[in-house]
Image: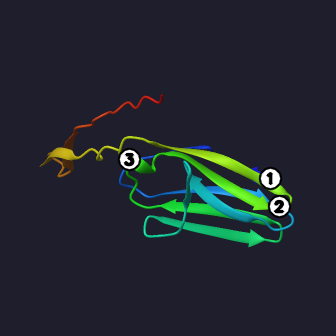
Amino acid sequence: MIFVPNQLVGAPAGTNVTIDCHTEAYPRAMSYWFLGDEMILSNEKYTTTIMENSYRAHMKLHIRNLQAGDFGNYRCISKNSLGETEGSIRLYEIPKPSAPPKATEIKSSANKEGEIILNIIIIVKVVVLGII
C-alpha cells in the first residue's frame, strides 16, 4: 500500500523541494523513485531517503535547484515478492514570490508637546496568481 500526502506540489524554478510517499508492505519492499521513465538515483541534484520501521517506510525525494526539466510526474514505487504498487506526484512550476513592499518615504516631526509624529508612505504591489 502507498499513501501520498501531497499529489500536487507547486514550487518556483531555482528553489529546492521535497516530495514524499508512505508505504506499507510485508515482506519488506524495495522502494524507489521515477521521473517519467527514468529511475532516480541520489546525486548532486536528487537526494533519496527511506526511513523504515518494521513493515512501514517513509520515502522522501529532495530535489535541488528546480529547472524546467524537473517539473512533471514523479512516481514512488514499492515492490516485494508479492507484488508492486506505486503513487504519483505531479510537480508543477509556480511563479516566484515578489519582493516584499519597501517603505519609500519616512517623515518625522514634533508637535508642541514634543511628541514625535512619523508619516510613512509605503508602496504595495499586489500580484494575483491564477491557478490552472
- Circles 3, 2 touching at the beta carbon (< 8 Å): no
Q: Position of residue 36 (x, y in %)?
A: 54, 48
**Sequence-wise first label, 3 or 2:** 2
Disc 1 to disc 3, how far (Cα)?
Answer: 31 Å
Residue 22 falls left or right of residue 104: right
At mark 1, the secondary structure is: loop
Residue drawn at x 41%, y 49% as measured from the top left: 69
Identify the amino acid type marked 2. Answer: Ala
Q: Position of residue 33 (x, y in %)?
A: 61, 58
Mark 2 and mark 1 in contact? Answer it, CB < 8 Å: yes
Circle 2: element type? loop
27 vs 56, nearest the viewer: 27
Q: Callout 2: 10 Å neighbours few (<14), some, many (20+)?
A: many
- Total labels: the figure holds 3
Residue 47 coordinates in the image, percent (x, y): 52, 67
Look at mark 1 in the image and give the residue it sits on. 1
Which amino acid lies under the numbered mark 3 shown in the image of this protein?
A: Ala
Q: Which residue is mark 2?
A: 25
Q: Earlier in the sequence, mark 2 or mark 1?
A: 1
- Residue 61: name its quadrant: bottom right
Q: Secondary structure at mark 3?
A: helix
Estimate how packed mark 3 is, as few (under 14), some (14 to 19) or many (20 or more) residues with alpha carbons within 10 Å.
few
Q: Which class describes the residues within 10 Å of circle 1: few (<14), some (14-19), or many (20+)?
A: few
Could you say where residue 23 lies in the image, as x and y percent from the top left? Answer: 75, 58
Is residue 5 visible in the rendered image? The answer is: no
87 relative position to 36: left or right: right
Report the residue at 44% width, 64% height from top.
45
- Disc nearer the start of the sequence (1/3): 1
Residue 68: mark: 3
User: In the image shown, does 33 or 38 lie closer to the viewer?
Assistant: 38
Residue 17's place in the image compared with 126, above or below, is below
Kindly identify the residue that appears in the image at 35 percent across and 45 percent down.
96
